[in-house]
Image (cartoon, rainbow, N blue to C red):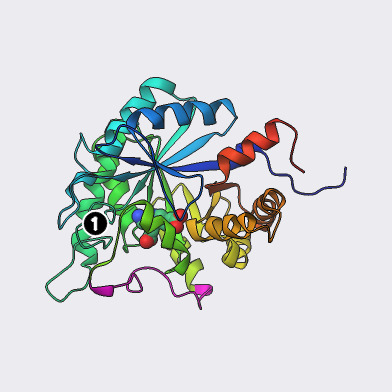
Amino acid sequence: MVAETRISADDLVAPLFVREGIDEPVPIDSLPGVVQHSQGSLRAEVERLAGLGVPGIILFGIPEHKDDEGSEAWNPDGVVQVALRNLRADLGDDVVLMADLCVDEYTSHGHCGIVGDDGRVDNDATLDLYAQAAVAQAAAGAHITAPSGMMDGQVFAIREALDEEEFVDVSILAYAAKYASSFYGPFRDAVDVTIADGGNRNGYQQDWRNAREAMEEIRFDLSEGADMIMVKPAVAYLDILTRARMEVDVPLAAYHVSGEYAMLKAAAQNGWIDGDVAAIETLTAIKRAGADFILTYLAGEVAERLKSGGAL
Ligand code: PBG
């Protein structure tokens, strides 16, 4: 009766992987229970999630061909664009279709942008790629595009491109406070990304020692036209979420990322924690800290348990 925070299926967004050129789903070892979907298995999974009351999904693509610029990210027949068209035809507006917007899954070097001769990512040259990818996603049926590359000025560039092409109703969920985190490891397995030459993303993602800087990133993104913002990862950054909640009144998302999910699953598989309870406890904590919705690989299983009355 006195519980202040309750998690429900409509707080959850399921991240889903779709891979080009496969007919059957492929399991991902470091993400137990998560797969790379074929176009067919993706459609069935989104149908299932909709039936469980999960209101949204976010798509990541694994293309057959990668190149220097990541051109499959804006190919109208690229893997995510095909998936968006299928899902929009299947479900209309019943499920919110979000598309992650970045090029790292599509580049041969694994960086989130164009790499210059000096080996560094060229922020401003990359904005053009993001603008093209946003338009391709919108044209294919995305309700929301979610830029995750952490280039300065990306939200403005995307908004401008969308408006020019008259996709004025497509919203932007900005990965505003995204840290250069070790917790993205299993995700990179899922999308077959290795950053070239032992590189990292410290040049564009945030330093985990900084909190005020995250607020500055959030303010920039809102001033550029973001409709919603995200903090990522979640569990190690609950303080950032709470600060963001106090600072802004737009919808606030948290991404419970691959490594956070994998740790929970690994401990549960060893019998070291009760995985079912830990999942609900974790998601409730993220909501309690201030998130309006949570991107999590737990979405399907938790929604299922909530439906059968099996959760707290
Ligand atoms: C970039 C992107 C990443 C994640 C979401 N979008 C990886 C990265 O920044 O290296 C990570 C998500 C997760 O770990 O679950 N396209």
Residue beneath the point at 74% across and 41% down: 311
Residue beneath the point at 49% across and 74% down: 208
Other-residue count near label 1 (Cα within 10 Å), few / some / many at <14 / 14–19 / ≥20: many
User: In which quadrant of this rendering is ligand 1 seen?
Assistant: bottom left
> Which residue is nearer to you in this view: 175 or 275?
275
**Is residue 170 within the magenta segment?**
no
Q: Does the image show residue 173?
A: yes
Q: As drawn, is 183 to the left or to the right of 80?
A: right
Q: Is residue 101 above or below residue 163?
A: below
Q: Is residue 50 above or below residue 246?
A: above
Residue beneath the point at 20% across and 35% down: 76
**Is residue 210 within the magenta segment?**
yes
Q: Does the image show residue 148?
A: no
Residue beneath the point at 40% across and 32% down: 42
Q: Give the x, y percent position of residue 41.
A: 40, 30
For label 1, being within 8 Å of ligand 1 is answered no
Q: As drawn, is 278 to the left or to the right of 48?
A: right
Residue 302: which quarter of the image? Answer: top right
Q: As drawn, is 141 to the left or to the right of 182?
A: left
Residue on which the image places disc 1: 127
Q: Give the x, y percent position of residue 258.
A: 48, 56
Assign the magenta stretch its main secondary structure: loop
Q: Quadrant of the C terminus?
A: top right
Q: Quadrant of the N terminus?
A: top right
Identify the element where label 1 is drawn: helix
Q: Give the x, y percent position of residue 109.
A: 21, 63
Q: As drawn, is 74 to the left or to the right of 232?
A: left
What's the magenta region? Answer: 197-212
What amino acid is found at the position of numbered circle 1 in the picture? Leu
Q: Is residue 44 above or below residue 162?
A: above
Q: Give the x, y percent position of residue 156.
A: 32, 53
